[in-house]
Image (cartoon, helix red, strand yellow):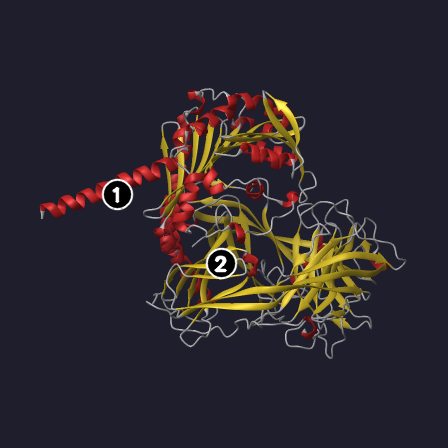
């Protein structure tokens, strides 16, 4: 027995020592990293960020596995201008997992030339090979700096028009410096001489950052606005500073451990005076306790989530920590189950408490893609707009149907009219889930006189020249919408032609590889792509896709009969440092086989299109829904007193309060069936002016009013109109702390009505009634958006008619108010609308009803 105990003790100690020997170097940074921290920590340093790449690789290997990569399986490189930092390193023969130890980033006060920042990559590098890449493929200009050679590179970001950056890069066998020109020359000597760290400056940072995988520390919160150059960013930074008076340091870190698997996200604030910090922590702790106590009665699973959050103060330091572990995952699962139960209950159904069986009952995927071994492009059928669920289109080119979907006023000042070109397709063999194998591009938009109207956009994430990828639309159908902007001043009445094309990379030949009763470690390989199975247990499957990943069309699990199993859950994640993807799937049934479908041969196909019918009218339908809304009539307070002989005919109740990011107060308004109330777009306003708390505190609105517009939009029941309403109030208040809510219910009655006729419904068309302007903001095939310049509550109703002046029904509009006072009315006409009659209240009489309601 003693020998057994002694042997067990030796094994445990050996494991502990081995873990320390393996893990400790992954956490503790090398001397070169410590020196790089000191080099970046200049007197004007504002922010320092770090990534412990060695620890990141260890965690990646632990949680996702090591990607199976061979040089022959590498993806073709992107052009230099489109490469990410990892792709640049790979092109320079730097293996991120093997060669890089740490990455550090420093941010400094902005100069006249813009943002100042620097990146130091610590590791072991072939400096000569990297310099050849910088000078050759990237065209860097060599310049001597402190006895070394630096390379100047100018980079233009195609996704952001204002992002043109000049970088200086110096390479050493132990580090790489990537910096703005202003700070580069000063940082090179600091890195070269490995000068000792300023312990006072880095003393607070190192114990925190050296224990985390990702770290961000701010030295000078008071200088945050000086480190950014844009006016909007400066305004945001100053707003943050207003909340950070007396703060010396701010730290955000993400750490992780493997046994048991868990993560830790923590926010740490150091202040010169600890008293305000302790007061703030006490407030946060009370708020957490109150929220948990309140939620424990109404949503116990949500309350349990708060157990993963801790708030504490130690001297002048405040720490907010969020733990991600199995307990949190279990609590999140309970929250989801409660939400699903709530939805079922709202639909009149019933859902039993969740109890996961040992193995899900087998279900077969009846909508699985049937891959075709060989596809001839000539056999692809034409788009059929008469098929079930197919969309009506204006032009058919091969398997695609194309149409103009919508046009709207410009969203940018220097742009013109915006158009949405839509394309659809039925199921195309071997094109699964839309993928990225089908794209639509718009090449030209011309006027009826042949003038080119398409705006030239050399940059921008969604610029006109960038194609849009098709996505899945149910039953293996595909759809895509490409938005383009025209030149300023383009007139929608003179649009003539829209030209473009659809590109498809068709897997003309596919190969299916299967593994019967596979075990972990089995690999399905074909044509430069590999699918490596890392875990199989019942219906659970984990695998990696590496190499030429684009050739993997699908991976699925089969039952003993060879039929694909339905998927209950599928999660995927790219490896932290690229080179592949890890997938975790749960299937309904026991996995007997796994198969992967690979693209053996691809054919590039193109279908040009030209749209000349830009009316968006569509094909005439056999039957249309007619608008049967009764006529509106003038109605004032005097008539109200005559018809309803009571001081307040409107009943308002406070139903409940809910707290999320703000406090939501929910009301119900009931009213008699008075003229105009049921169908008018706006009949009044509910405003909360005061919230009374049980401790005697009274809260009032600060910058934004606590109010909402009122409209009914639904028929009366038993002679009563009913409308649920809600108001968002500032701050997060515990519902049980609210005693009463006070405010004003304002109802409005049109004493005089005027009709504004819009004879054409194209973006920009408008009309005026007094100082109120109504403009057509957007027009789609089944949508129309009108914008009121101000006082949108005077818009009583919009009656739509077709080209024959027949009324067209429209569903309840979506009415929104903009901060500048403009109102938008989004209508959904059930037919091709050609004209609009906007009914406007020329003389409005308002009646106020004060209220004070206690929350029960």
Residue extending furthest toward the bottom: 622
Give the left or right position of residue 100, taking residue 113 as reference: left
Of residues 171 and 575, which is closer to you in this image? 171
The residue shown at (56%, 26%) is 223
The residue that mark 1 highlights is: 15
The residue shown at (65%, 54%) is 816
Q: Is residue 440 above or below residue 228?
A: below
Q: Position of residue 606 (x, y in %)?
A: 72, 63
SS label for mark 2: strand
Q: Position of residue 297 (x, y in %)?
A: 36, 55
Of residues 528 and 789, which is closer to you in this image? 528
**Residue 831 image-quadrant placement:** bottom right
Decide if residue 451 is in sight here.
yes
Q: Is residue 842 above or below residue 515?
A: above
Tell me if label 2 and label 1 are in contact, CB under 8 Å.
no
The residue shown at (73%, 66%) is 402
């Amino acid at each position: 027995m003693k020998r057994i105990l002694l042997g067990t003790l030796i094994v445990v100690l050996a494991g502990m020592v081995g873990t320390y020997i393996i893990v400790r170097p992954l956490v503790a940074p090398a001397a070169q990293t410590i020196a790089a921290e000191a080099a970046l920590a200049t007197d004007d340093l504002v922010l320092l960020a770090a990534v412990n790449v060695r620890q990141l690789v260890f965690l990646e290997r632990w949680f996702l596995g090591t990607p199976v990569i061979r040089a022959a399986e590498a993806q073709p490189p992107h052009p230099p201008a489109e490469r990410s930092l990892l792709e640049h390193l790979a092109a320079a023969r730097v293996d991120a997992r093997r060669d890089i130890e740490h990455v550090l980033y420093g941010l400094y006060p902005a100069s006249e030339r813009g943002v100042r920042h620097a990146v130091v990559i610590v590791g072991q590098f072939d400096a000569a090979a990297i310099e050849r890449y910088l000078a050759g493929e990237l065209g860097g200009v060599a310049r001597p700096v402190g006895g070394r050679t630096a390379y100047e590179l100018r980079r233009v970001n195609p996704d952001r028009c204002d992002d043109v950056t000049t970088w200086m890069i110096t390479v050493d066998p132990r580090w790489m410096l990537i910096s703005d020109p202003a700070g580069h020359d000063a940082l090179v000597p600091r890195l070269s001489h490995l000068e000792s760290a300023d312990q006072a400056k880095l003393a607070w940072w190192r114990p925190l950052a050296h224990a985390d995988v990702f770290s961000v520390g701010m030295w000078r919160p008071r200088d945050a606005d000086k480190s950014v150059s844009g006016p909007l960013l400066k305004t945001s930074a100053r707003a943050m500073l207003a909340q950070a008076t007396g703060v010396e340091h701010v730290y955000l870190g993400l750490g992780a451990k493997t046994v048991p698997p868990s993560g830790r996200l923590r926010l740490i604030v150091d202040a010169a005076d600890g008293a305000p910090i302790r007061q703030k922590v006490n407030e946060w702790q009370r708020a957490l306790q109150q929220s948990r106590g309140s939620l424990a009665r109404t949503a116990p699973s949500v309350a349990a989530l708060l157990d993963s959050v801790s708030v504490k103060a130690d001297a002048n330091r405040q720490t907010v920590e969020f733990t991600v572990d199995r307990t949190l995952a279990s609590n999140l699962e309970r929250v989801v189950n409660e939400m699903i139960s709530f939805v079922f209950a709202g639909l009149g159904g019933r859902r039993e408490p969740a109890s996961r069986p040992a193995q899900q009952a087998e279900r077969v995927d009846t909508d699985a893609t049937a891959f075709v071994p060989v596809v001839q492009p000539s056999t692809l059928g034409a788009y059929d707009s008469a098929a079930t669920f197919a969309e009506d289109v204006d032009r058919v080119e091969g398997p695609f149907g194309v149409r103009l979907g919508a046009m709207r006023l410009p969203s940018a000042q220097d742009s013109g009219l915006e158009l949405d070109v839509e394309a659809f397709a039925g199921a195309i063999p071997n094109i699964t889930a839309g993928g990225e194998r089908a794209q639509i591009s718009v090449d030209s938009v011309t006027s009826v006189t042949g003038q080119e109207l398409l705006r030239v956009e050399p940059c921008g994430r969604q610029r006109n020249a960038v194609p849009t990828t098709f996505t899945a639309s149910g039953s293996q159908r595909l759809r895509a919408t490409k938005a383009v902007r025209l030149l300023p001043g383009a007139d929608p009445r003179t649009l003539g032609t829209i030209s473009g094309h659809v590109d498809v990379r068709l897997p003309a030949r596919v190969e299916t590889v299967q593994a019967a009763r596979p075990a972990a470690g089995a690999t399905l390989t074909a044509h430069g792509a590999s699918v490596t199975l890392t875990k199989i247990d019942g219906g659970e499957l984990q695998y990696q896709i590496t190499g030429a990943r684009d050739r993997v069309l699908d991976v699925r699990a089969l039952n003993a009969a060879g039929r694909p199993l339905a998927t209950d859950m599928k999660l995927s994640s790219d490896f932290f440092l690229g080179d592949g993807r890890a997938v975790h799937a749960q299937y309904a049934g026991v996995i007997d086989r796994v198969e992967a479908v690979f693209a053996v041969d691809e054919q590039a196909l193109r279908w040009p299109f030209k749209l000349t019918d830009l009316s968006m009218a569509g094909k005439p339908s056999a039957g249309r829904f007619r608008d049967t809304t009764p006529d509106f009539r003038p109605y004032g307070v005097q008539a109200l007193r005559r018809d309803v002989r009571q001081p307040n005919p409107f009943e308002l109740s406070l139903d409940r309060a809910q707290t999320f990011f703000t406090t939501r107060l929910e009301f119900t308004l009931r009213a008699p069936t008075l003229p105009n109330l049921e169908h008018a777009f706006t009949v009044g306003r509910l405003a909360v002016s005061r919230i009374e708390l049980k401790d005697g505190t009274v809260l009032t609105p600060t910058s934004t009013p606590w109010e909402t517009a009122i409209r009914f939009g639904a028929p009366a029941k038993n002679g009563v109109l009913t409308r649920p309403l809600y108001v968002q109030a500032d701050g997060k208040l515990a519902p049980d702390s609210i005693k009463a809510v006070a405010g004003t219910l304002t109802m409005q009655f049109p004493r005089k009505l005027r009709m504004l006729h819009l004879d054409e419904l194209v973006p920009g068309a408008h009309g005026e009634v007094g100082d109120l302007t109504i403009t057509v903001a957007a027009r789609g095939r089944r949508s129309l958006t009108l914008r009121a310049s101000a006082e949108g509550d005077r818009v009583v109703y919009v009656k739509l008619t077709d080209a024959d002046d027949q009324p067209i029904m429209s569903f309840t509009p979506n009415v929104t108010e903009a901060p500048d006072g403009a109102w938008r009315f989004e209508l959904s006409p059930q037919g091709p609308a050609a004209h609009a009659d906007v009914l406007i209240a020329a003389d409005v009489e308002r009646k106020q009803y004060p209220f004070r309601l206690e929350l029960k």
